[in-house]
Amino acid sequence: MRMEEIIISEEQEGRRIDKGLFLDENQVSRSRLQKLLKEEMVLVNHKPVKPSYRLRTGDAVCVQIPENQPASILPEDIPLDILYEDDCLLVVNKPQGMVVHPAPGHAEHTLVNAVLAHCQGNLSGINGELRPGIVHRIDRDTSGALVICKDDHAHRDLAQQLKEHTIHRVYHAVVKGNIKENEGCIDAPIGRHPTDRKRMSIHSRCGRRAVTHYQVLKRFGDYTYVQCRLETGRTHQIRVHMASISHPLTGDPVYNRSGDNPFHLAGQALHAYILGFRHPRTGEYLETSAPFPESFTNLLNKLEKTNLNG
C-alpha cells in the first residue's frame, strides 16, 4: 500500500476533490481516484469524504493507493482448518505464517490459493480477482479465525456488519510488561507512520479512529496475558495500540522496538480467538472459536512454569 499525502493549496481551493486533486496520472487516473473515494481510501483531515467534497486551503488529504499486483492466482491444494462451513461462507483457522491474499513477494501459498482449491473457485468477487471471498484479513504472523464468502450477497452483508462495527472479534495476546489495571480502552487513531512507511502509528496525520478494549487474563511478572476486543479494524491495530501504551506484543518484530524475543517466537504472540457475526442468510448469530496454535500454548506453558518457579 502506497500513501500520497497532500496539503491543499490556495490554487485548489473550492474544487471538487474528484477533479481538483493533483496526482500522478501514471499512478492514479481520475476513474481510479473516484473508485478510491468510494472505497473510503481517501481521507480529508482524517475522515472519508464524498467525490463532491469541495477542497479547502490547508486540508490534509491522504490517498491510500494499493500496489500493483499479479494479474491472476491459481488454486493450491493446501489443507485448511475449517471451523464452520455452509453453502455461502466458511470460517477457517489461519495458521501463523500464512499470508491471506497474494501480494508482491507472496504470489503463492496464500490462504486465497487454498480456499480457491477448496471451494473450486466459487467465491465472492467483490474484492477483485486477487482477493476472492476476502472480507477482512489478519496479519501473516497472526493466527486464528477468518471468514471467507462464497457469494456476493454474503460478502456485502458481512462488509456492512464490519462497517457498522457489529462483528464480534476477540483476540488473545501476550504482551511485554506487567499491566497494572485489570482492563482498559485505547481510543487512538491509526494511520501510516510519518517516517517509516512499513509501520502504522497513532501519530499519523491521516489516522482513522481506532478503538481496542483489553482485559488482563493473567500476569506473569514481566509479561501479561490479555484479551483484546476490536471495536474497529485498522491495519496492525492491536499491535500498534498495545505498543502505544508501552506493552508491545511479545515477539513482534515491528512494534517491539527493543527487539526483546527471549522465547524465539516466529512472530507476534497474537491469535484471533473468537469471531461472531449475524449469518447473512439466516440472520442468526454465528460464533466460532479458533483453537490456539502450538506455539501460543507452548509460550503460555513456559510463562506459567517461570511464574511458579519464580
Image (tube, helix red, strand yellow):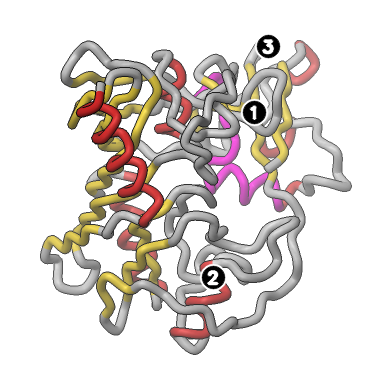
Please state if 242 lies on the left or on the right of 43 as rendered.
left
Task: Say which residue appears at 48% left-offset and 77% top-offset.
Answer: 115
Question: Is the residue 6 above or below the residue 57 in the image?
Answer: below
What residue does disc 1 label? 62
- Residue 258 pos. (x, y %): 57, 19
The residue lying furthest to the bottom in this view is: 120
Say what amino acid the circle numbered 2 marks. Answer: Val
Q: Depth check: 169 or 296 in front?
A: 296
Q: What x and y, as percent, mark residue 186?
A: 32, 20
Q: Is mark 2 on a helix, strand or loop?
A: helix
- The magenta stretch spans which residues? 32-46
> Label 1 to label 3, Cα distance in Å?
15 Å
Measuring 27% from the left and 51% from the top, which residue is drawn there?
273
Residue 68 percent location from the top left of the image = 76, 55
- Name the residue beneath numbered marker 2: 112
Location of the C terminus by quadrant is: top left
Write down the residue under mark 3: 57
Relative to 14, is 70 above or below? below
What residue is at 62 percent from the left and 67 percent from the top?
130
Question: Do residues under tags 1 and 2 come within 8 Å of each other at their CB atoms?
Answer: no
Between the C-alphas of marks 3 and 2, the distance is: 43 Å
First in sequence, mark 1 or 3: give its number. Answer: 3
